[in-house]
Amino acid sequence: MPTHDLIIIGAGSGNSILTPDFDDWRVALVEEGPLGGTCLNRGCIPSKMFVYPADLALAARRGSSLGVHTSFESADWKGIRDRIFDRIDPIADSGMEYRLRQDHVDLYPARGRFTGHKQLEVDGDTISADTIVLAAGAHATIPDIPGLDSVDHHTSDTIMRIDGLPERMTIIGGGYIAAEMGHVFDAFGTHVTMLVRGPHMLRDEDDDISILATAAYRERMDVRLRTSIQLVSQADGVITVDTAGGSVESELLLVAVGRTPNGASLGVDMTGVEMDEEGYVVVDSHGRTSVDGIWALGDISSPEQLKHKANADARIVAHNIAHPDDMRALDLGPVPHAIFGHPHIAGVGPTERDVVAAGTPYVKVVREYSGAAYGWAMEDTTSVAKLMAHAETRRLLGAHIIGPQASTLIQQLIQGMRFGQTVDQMARDQWYIHPALPEVIEQALLEL
């Protein structure tokens, strides 16, 4: 006999499943870490709380270029860190206290693993339910590098809670975590060396964007491209990374090569749930897995691994479980993303290489910020907005922006894409405030 009506594995976005619709359900909530998941405790929220003071530090360094006599002296890492987590940790703690007070919720603060069909072992107990939600997220990927397992190293899970700034830091990886953390530590005064396997950083971005981002980072820090790591070792507090092009020494090593969904570590195959070749749980547009009664949401099933995607998944799954006769599908169009390094980056829709590979007829424009009044006022010479439209339908295919306020500027384009506007309608059928930065988007749309 099932021990519960509903089991939720993961208390990040999975925690929001418990709407009033489930007040009469017997629920098991399984979470080995603090409530709130990766985003609240070790991901997007604390990292952006570090990024903001890092942006201020970098701006202080560069004030003289605009005639402002500012300079950067130092950063109080411990003060910044404690300000951040003294705000975040109580939120996670209060969330746990709230769930513990609920009579219909059994909180299991431990790791769970499937041992059979709809049977989950948690801290020595076996629980089961007819309805199960997989919301267990993803974990930092640790590459197979000789010596790495015997060397002190950090991932995105731990790097933001260290006790002090290192003088030198090595980052293995060139993706969004490497970009954001590289920006933070460099801005605060650490000498950062970034070891990137490919020819550019941020390889999942549009090529024009990744090339510009790589150039910007190489101006600030030691970014080594096409790097193959041969060995990692540690002695007397110094970590040495040996590559084909030479060795790098530092006091701190950050491994930031990506994140792996937790389906395999959760043993979902034991309950018959299908995973794809990359390890993501396969779901349909309603959030259903290949097993009746088992649902999945967030990073365990979404290659985008984005909090706004996980939250949208959770809303759909919660509704569909509670209202099986009124099923809803998640259909909001292409999933947008942003990277909060420096420069900021945002994108939605396919890259140009994807459009070319699909054989789609298209037109494009790459518009510099400097062409708009506000960009000119900032003396910005490197930021751009790149837009691509279908050559026949005139609908926007993709947008990719690198520069200040990128994550805000792209929102109007997301909305236009969602509601089927042509680029001509986006350009001419609304007001653009002069001389605000959105004029960059207006100019790009007009040029298309």
Image (spheres, rainbow, N blue to C red):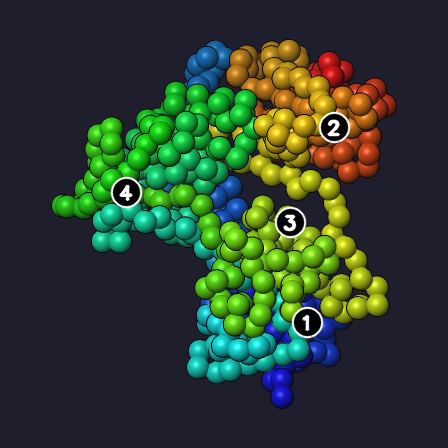
Q: Residues within 10 Å of mark 1 (few under 14, many from 20)?
A: some
Secondary structure beneath dot 3 equals helix
- Give percent across and percent down for residue 364: 68, 19
Q: Which residue is mark 4?
A: 252
- Contact (Cβ within 8 Å) of mark 1 with mark 2: no
What kind of residue is marked 4? Leu
Q: Disc 3 or 4, which lies upstream in sequence?
A: 4
Q: Report the side of 425 relative to 47 (left or right).
A: right
- Contact (Cβ within 8 Å) of mark 3 with mark 4: no
What kind of residue is marked 3? Lys
What kind of residue is marked 2? Leu
Quarter of the rendering occupied by the N terminus: bottom right
Q: Disc 1 or 2, which lies upstream in sequence?
A: 1
Q: Is residue 337 above or below residue 157?
A: above
Residue at image point 82% right, 37% down: 419
Alpha carbon separation for disc pair 1 and 4: 45 Å
Q: Which residue is mark 1?
A: 293
Alpha carbon separation for disc pair 1 and 3: 21 Å
Q: Which residue is mark 3?
A: 309
Secondary structure beneath dot 4 equals strand
Q: Disc 3 or 2, which lies upstream in sequence?
A: 3
Q: Residues within 10 Å of mark 3 (few under 14, many from 20)?
A: many
Nearest-to-viewer mark from 1 and 4? 1
Nearest-to-viewer mark from 4 and 2? 2
Alpha carbon separation for disc pair 1 and 2: 38 Å
Q: Quick one: 153 or 72, which is closer to the camera?
A: 153
- Give percent across and percent down for residue 84: 47, 48
Q: Which residue is mark 2?
A: 396
Write down the quadrant of residue 139 in the picture: bottom left
